[in-house]
Amino acid sequence: MEVKNINEDNYLEFIETIKELVSNNELNKAEEYLLKIIFILENISIRKGIGVSPGFYMDLAKIYKKQKNKDKEREILHQYLIQHKPGGSLSQKIFERYLKIVKPTNLDELKDSLYEEYQNKIILAKLKTKFIECSFCKKKIKMVIPSSNYPVFRGTCPRCYESNLFIVDK
């Protein structure tokens, strides 16, 4: 199956294919698959207001690291960090990996900059949002509310990247 045949309904079927490509050191082909899947996930996220799955971004970052391409590794991690994210510990791990690459001199300034990009992205996408206070960093943050009528859902703070924020949509 060609990369162009990946779509919203079948992208999960390619996980084993990608693993096989990586193990066979066919990194460029694995990169093509992952970039296509990430594109699909970001479109789903915008349309449905759900967070993007971090695993595909991390897999691509590992490929870039294996290729010794720090710029692309930084870019894909950055791309993930400004997306709407579901709950789960991988968001924090991606943030920590990003910090090792960019080595910020001012962590708060970096977090503010990433949060601003996140806000711009969700404003442009016209996603439904709600302000809450993060129970971890104690900052007031804008969280995306899924388009489906979920009264309670879990997310990741777009400022501190701690997960397990439970948001109630009333």
Image (spheres, helix red, strand yellow):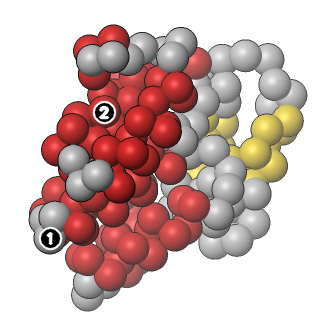
Q: Quadrant of the C terminus?
A: top right
Label 2 environment density (alpha carbons within 10 Å; few <14, some 14–19, many ≥20): many
Seen from the viewer's position, the closer of residues 109 and 103 is 103
Which quadrant of the view contains residue 167?
top right
| Callout 2 secondary element | helix
Q: Which residue is mark 2?
A: 33
Q: Which mark is residue 68?
A: 1
Q: Are marks 2 and 1 in contact (CB under 8 Å)?
A: no
Seen from the viewer's position, the closer of residues 114 and 12 is 12
Which quadrant of the view contains residue 92?
bottom right
- Amino acid residing under circle 2: Tyr
Above or below, comparing residue 147 to residue 18 in the picture: above
Tell me the residue at 31%/33% (across/down). 33
On screen, residue 29 versus residue 51, left or right, reads left
Above or below, comparing residue 66 to residue 158 in the picture: below
- Amino acid residing under circle 1: Lys
Q: Position of residue 6 (x, y in %)?
A: 38, 17
On screen, residue 93 versus residue 157, left or right, reads left
Seen from the viewer's position, the closer of residues 77 and 60 is 60
| Callout 1 secondary element | loop
